[in-house]
Amino acid sequence: MSNFDEAKTQFIRDRIKETAFHERQYIHHLLWLEDIIFRGGPTQWAEGMAYGGLRKDYPLEAEAIRRELREGKRTTPEEFKALQEERTRKLAMDEEEWRLSLDARESDELQEWLKAGGLPDGAIRRDSSEQ
């Protein structure tokens, strides 16, 4: 049996109101996070690994739950939406920066490759017997 009505934070109660039944695993994960944070952190190795994974998957949610339980500061649905949008923008920018950095590294490596006598992509290799 699930304990959806036993959420300790308003943050999770708000997420329940926004979440469809078929996506309830998200709420299960938040409740697990809440329980671990409420108890002061993981108490065993496996729980610590799970907690680390949950915090990685739900960083905004973990922080909102922590703030509400430890500091009494509630994250409103509007604040959470704004945080989600900001995180999405930051992730998109980080991904673009990574892609540009990769492109630059590949360009440098291509120049080194060509300088060493390597063929560019799409070039037809000729056997030494054909020359």
Image (cartoon, rainbow, N blue to C red):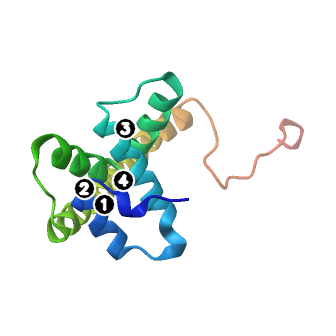
Please give the residue where the numbered disc 2 appears in the rendered image. Answer: 9
**Distance (Cα) linking label 1 and label 4:** 29 Å
Q: Amino acid at mark 4?
A: Glu
Answer yes or no: do the residues labelled 1 and 3 have beta carbons within 8 Å?
Answer: no
Q: Please, what secondary structure does the residue beneath circle 1 have? A: helix
Answer yes or no: do the residues labelled 3 and 2 have beta carbons within 8 Å?
Answer: no
Answer yes or no: do the residues labelled 2 and 1 have beta carbons within 8 Å?
Answer: yes
- Tell me the crowding category of disc 1: few under 14, some 14 to 19, or many 20 or more residues within 10 angstroms, Cα based: many
Q: Please, what secondary structure does the residue beneath circle 4 have? A: helix
Q: Position of residue 106 (x, y in %)?
A: 47, 42
Foreground residue among 79 and 88: 79
Which numbered circle lies on residue 36?
3
Q: Please, what secondary structure does the residue beneath circle 3 have? A: helix
Identified at 51% across, 61% down, the residue is: 25
Please give the residue where the numbered disc 4 appears in the rendered image. Answer: 95
Which numbered circle lies on residue 22?
none
Identified at 50% across, 69% down, the residue is: 23
